[in-house]
Image (cartoon, helix red, strand yellow):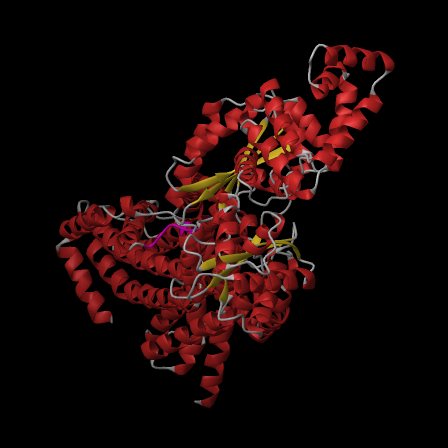
Amino acid sequence: MKIVFDKFAIWIKAHAKISISIILILTCVFGMGLSKIKLSMGNEIFVSQNSKVFKDTTTYQKHFGGDGVYILMSGKQSDLLSQKNLKKITILSNDLKQVKNVRGTMNIVSVMNEQLKNAANGSATSSFNISGDGQNEIMANLTSGQQAKIQTTLENLLNTEQKSKIQNYSINLLSASQKSEMAGKIATGQNAQLATTAVMTTAQTKQIQNYSSSLLTTQQQAILQKEVIKALPAVQNMNSKLLHNLLFSNNGKLPTQLNQLLPQNGKHLLFVVNTSDKTDMSVYVQLSKDINGLINKENFYHRIKIRVAGLPVVQGQVQNEVFKTMGTMLGLAVVIMIVILYLIFPVRRRLLSLLFVVVSLIWTFGIMGLLGIPLTLATMATLPIIIGLGTDFGVQFHNRYEEEYRRENDSQIAADIAISNMGPAVGIALIVMSLSFLTMFLAKAPMMQQFGLTLAIGVVASYIVEIVLMFATLTLLDHKNPTKTIKATQDSKLSVLLGKYAGFVIHHAKAVLAVGLIAMGIGFSLEPKVGVQTDLLKMIPQNMSTLKNTKYLQTKAGSTTYLTYLVKSNKKLDVQDIQTIKRIGASENEKYSGIVGVTSVATLLEQNNVHIQGLSALGVSSSIKNLPSAARQTTISSNKKFATIQFKVKNKLVAKKQLVLLNKINRDIKKTSHNGLKISPAGAQVMMLNGTVNMTANHDLIMFAGLAIIFIVLALVYRDLKLAMMPVIPILIVLGLSPLSLYLMNIPYNPVTIALSSLVLGIGTEFTILILERYKEERDQGIESKQAIISSVSSVGQAITVSGLTVMGGFAAIIFASFPVLQTFGLITVLDTGFSLISALTVLPAVIYLFDKNTRRKN
């Protein structure tokens, strides 16, 4: 390996400008990929596209669309249900139907109009009970012409006996003077019934109407109700009193189907927008803009508070937060590292490594765009990580060059020595680091695989850029001043301090190693007690307006979370299939307290007073067709071969318990056959729950694979099992300290912190390998073991302390992200990087000394 770097050093000396030009050309090429980067927060980053649940969800969304957007209007009932507001809602609904990726809408106006239309056509409905007092109140709000028409219908319905009873009842209500007046009218030739009606008071007329209604048979009542409904205007054109009488016609109660649309007895009005199967982030961003734009266009009454909620608009707002967060992290990371480099990196041109990192970032994110790797919650965190690690590489190269330049006072010799020694050392660390990051391909979530791949690309790009630009630039700059000498300086205070510290560690090597191993054991024993955060809504910025609106919606309208099951049939669903759907829903609802309701085509038919049993195929088709279209679209497909069973989850049931509930329902459904129906979980919430499992899966496997990679690579490089084992022990200790820290701070794992083991393996390996490589170099020069350890820690320790602090500075910027998931990740990563640095400077010298001591005794 050293021969390769010797040749590289010769090339850099002879072609420094060409080397810089090549890097700049490649930067332009990779930079073209920046515009191709796409933001993704959809199902595809949590669950593999080859998995059954992903395929079932794709089928589900194809037939039933994506998640709904909720528009919640809050205010006084009189304002919400005013004719003016309902007209605006109608216009908004019609406008939204024209918006791309909107499948339809559901609101109080559309549902009532559809139900009234079905009732007028003779379809069964239980939403409105227009009879008795309620019918009379509604008639009182009709025009005289409409009233006359309904009265004529009533008279035609009555048989002779009913008419006689009504006539006798009417006469008995009349006073003596009224009877006298009625007789006079009859004497003039007026019809007896008309004469009776003419002399009656309003109160008497109402009494007769009630009496007449009580005499009607069920069939007569249905015909009359149909005529009353036919006479009604469209809901948006009704006056407030008529609408109120209609809504509460069922003994003063709101119809069951309308409870969800008018939460808390009309203090709120819910408007649902059904979205298409397109779940791209860009679709949700545009959809949010379109919906809010149309709401603003309608200029609703100022006393009505409007909130737009639901997962699509939450994800739509996340995009802006992502870019704001990345800008914040980039700025803070740069500022922090400038401060660190100026304070504790005593070399000339100390900001060069940070400057070159900009090129590394262009390479990394450009390659991401070209390869189609999306920007996710995980991959966005790679920005400050790559800044830190890239600066770290540059610091190592720069530090060794300056060390040799002070000694030799010749830029070419300094570059030769630095490249020959640091190139392989950092290169070995790079190989181990990259492979450690790639162990995340053992994770089940595509997001974590993309995170590992992005980090591997980033560190490889940083290594190439830093080693080429650093030595080419330094060679050119110092070659222009060949006579300028650099005064040999004494070791820095930090270097002296680290040398003394190494001597202390060697003197107490056994105790140091014992303490480290005990802490590691405690940490690993406590890891099962560290919780796992699985609620993705708690991982995004909590101050987002759409998230606040969604939480508010759930407190006022109840849970909007559903565990959805897709029902597939090879034929059109028949009565038996619908009964099976009904049985499954009812059984699970009764069995589990976490379920607070079930929605399916069976429950919709029941709510509309349709008795499933005994229906013919034509009857089933007709009954389904008469269901409210918005509700029908979410429960049965247009080809009648797919249906859904939606289990409404108890409000505030945490994701962990939702997952347990999902697994229980899955087991129940698998236990029995269902008349050839295939029933499987699908939909956004199911995907989200599966995604959180995927992101935390194979954690231990990833860690052990990383450790195995470190050992195998170092064994192949050094061809010495003892040397290969030395870096593993300090890293193992850090891996134990990580869960110990989480436990003590009461911080749960989350989908991003799960990746900490790979980061620890990568970063920790670099620190230990650099010290180990310098130790080997010192030993090859014949220096005694103890002094070689002190010299290695003193010289390399300064560089890795600086680089460690720069890496920690980069990670510290993540703490200030607006995403809670990243804040936690940043904090723990800073601690783990600190542990890696301390372990490399403390545990590794102890291990080297004890291993070498035993070797010397054997010799």
Horizontal side, residue 778 vs residue 154: left or right:
left
Q: Position of residue 192 (x, y in %)?
A: 72, 19
Q: Position of residue 811 (x, y in %)?
A: 47, 51
Quarter of the image that includes the C terminus: bottom left
Say which quarter of the image contains residue 770: bottom left
Q: Kindly identify the residue that appears in the image at 55 percent across and 26 percent down.
A: 233
From the viewer's perspective, is residue 716 above or below residue 581? below
Judging depth in this view, the residue of 801 and 316 nearest the camera is: 316
Q: Position of residue 18 (x, y in %)?
A: 13, 51
Task: Let me know if residue 323 appears in the view.
Answer: no
Horizontal side, residue 530 vs residue 87: left or right:
right
Is residue 378 in the magenta section? yes
The residues colored magenta run 373-381
Q: Given the current orientation, which residue lies at the most extreme right position?
A: 176
Task: Let me know if residue 30 appears in the view.
Answer: yes
Say which quarter of the image contains residue 518: bottom right
Judging depth in this view, the residue of 568 and 298 nearest the camera is: 568
Horizontal side, residue 759 vs residue 115: left or right:
left
From the viewer's perspective, is residue 531 above or below residue 363? below
Q: Kindly identify the residue that appears in the image at 78 percent across and 32 percent down.
A: 165
Say which quarter of the image contains residue 286: top left
Q: Position of residue 262 (x, y in %)?
A: 63, 36
